[in-house]
Image (cartoon, rainbow, N blue to C red):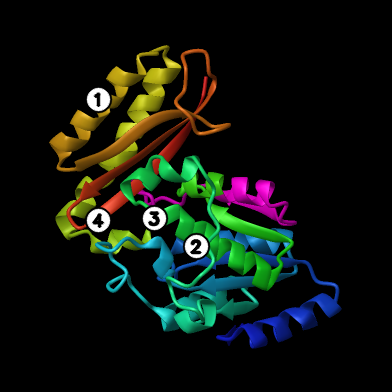
Amino acid sequence: MQTVTTIKALHEQLDRARAEGKRIGLVPTMGNLHQGHLRLVEAALQHADFVVASIFVNPLQFGPSEDLERYPRTLAEDQAQLTQSGCHLLFAPNEAEIYPHGRTGQTFVEVPGISDLYCGASRPGHFRGVTTIVNKLFNLVRPDVAVFGRKDYQQLHVISRMVSDLSIPVELIGVGTERADNGLALSSRNGYLSAEELTVAPTLYATLTDMARALKQGDSDHALLIEHAQQQLERAGFVRDYIHILRRSDMLPARAEDRELVIIAAAYLGAARLIDNIEVDL
């Protein structure tokens, strides 16, 4: 695997791959890779001949009080894992390469409506930063296929809307959440959890699983289900952010007659904000 840090070098590598008739895959990341990221690379290799991973800790998707400066940066370890996974090219630019006019001078791409809900309400401006960097990466790499994790369920929905609205010629693939044996969704931010908190963290997924079971058994009082779940998390030591039962089609609140649902949740545990989701078919 080769590593490039400039747009010029990226384009040189991609031009060679395209000249050989190769189908290009993209896996955007912020680094500090875990097995969930490597599964995205594996999925990309199934749909493309030449896979590009990007590592860029995007400042535009962090709020002023969030963890930009302490977000873990582990480039050497990430390069080793990507090489072992079969990735062909790593694009690891610095901030000036991506935002030459600075953070405030950058043109933004924003998906209205859904970007302001759920994680967007808790983290104002977050999804504007996400869609801006993903759109830029799509323009730089021009991938045939791009792979994202379904753990960030709202993020994938927002990116799908952007791709559809802007007629971006890329196939999106969502890959299921990679979990530890105890059910905890793998996340770079799990590193913020203490040893004791790591034993509590799987309660988030267990709570969503209980909600899904209740829905399948015919419980249609969504408000009561959500409140009971919040109380269960608080008893375990979480601080509530949100839990919602939504339609998968548009990520708006589900009605009793809806059959294809997703439960999404975010909650704070110590220094970490954890997110998770579970799809439910009735």
Q: Tell me which corner region of the image, top left, top right, bottom left or bottom right, holds residue 68.
A: bottom left
Residue at image point 52% right, 44% down: 112
Label 4: how many Cα within 10 Å (few below 14, some 14–19, many 20+): some
Label 1: how many Cα within 10 Å (few below 14, some 14–19, many 20+): few
The span picked out in magenta is 159-186
**Position above or below: 52 against 181:** below
- Whole-percent x and y of residue 151? 46, 48
Circle 1 sits on which residue?
A: 227
Numbered mark located on residue 186 in the image: 3
Kindly indicate whether the residue at mark 4 contacts the one at mark 2 (C-beta within 8 angstroms). no
Assess whether residue 201 is covered by the magenta stretch: no
Q: What element carries label 4?
A: strand
**Position above or below: 60 against 147:** below
Q: What element carries label 3?
A: loop
Numbered mark located on residue 94 in the image: none
- Whole-percent x and y of residue 90? 58, 78
Q: Tell me which corner region of the image, top left, top right, bottom left or bottom right, holds residue 241.
A: top left
Numbered mark located on residue 37 in the image: 2
Numbered mark located on residue 272 in the image: 4
Q: Three-letter amino acid code at disc 1?
A: Glu
Assess whether residue 178 is covered by the magenta stretch: yes
